[in-house]
Image (cartoon, rainbow, N blue to C red):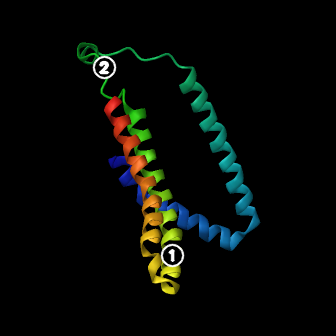
Amino acid sequence: MMVWLAGLPVLVAACAGAVLLVRRKGRAVLTVFLGLNGLLLVGAAIVLVVALSGVDAAASPLTVAQGASPTANWAALIGAAISVAGSSIGAAIAVAYTGAAALAALSERPELFGRAMVIVGLAEGIAIYGLIVAVILIGQA
């Protein structure tokens, strides 16, 4: 983690320098950047192929004694995070649209308050479904 934090100012300086070079030199620098990007893509593809074709590492005595490795449930935790994040974003978008429509309808006909709040509540239920899926995934991890 410290390597990423130490490398962050270097990354920001490199991006600022790249922006300045593109503004001054134009197309020539852009073609160089595209070439470097292509080389980086090829290198990443090679690393991916080597990583996927490798043999599984042997388990350490500590993980064998406990019965499972401490990082065995990373996929379930990532799935839980994605389900909560995705459902929360979806619910926010749904509540934004239905809430705006409900307020517009209430300004014309105030007696529609109960119906409008039910629709907004149904839109908020999307986030609750994502939370339930996350709890199930974490429970099985």
Query: Does the rendering let one see residue 51?
Result: yes
**63 w.r.t. 117: above or below:** above
Element at badge 2? loop
Residue 60: image location, x then y, percent:
30, 16
At a point 64% along the width and 68% down the height, the residue shown is 21
CA gap, disc 1 to disc 2?
Answer: 50 Å
Q: Secondary structure at mark 1?
A: helix
Count the marks: 2
Quick one: which residue is furthest to the bottom in this view?
A: 108
The one nearer the camera, 141 or 40, is: 141
Q: Toward which corner of the image does residue 139 lie, by quadrant?
A: top left
* Closer to us: 125 or 19: 125
User: Which is in the foreground here, disc 1 or disc 2?
Assistant: 1
- Residue farthest along the front direction in this orientation: 111
Q: Which mark is residue 6?
A: none
Earlier in the chain: of badge 1 and badge 2, it is: 2
User: Where's residue 120, x and y in %?
Assistant: 45, 66
* In-front residue for pair 67/23: 67
Residue name at image x 48 percent, y 79 percent: 103
Badge 2, how many Cα within 10 Å: few under 14, some, many 20+? Answer: few
Q: Residue at x 46, y 52 (%)?
A: 87
User: Would you name the residue on which mark 2 appears?
Assistant: 68
Quadrant for the C terminus in the image: top left
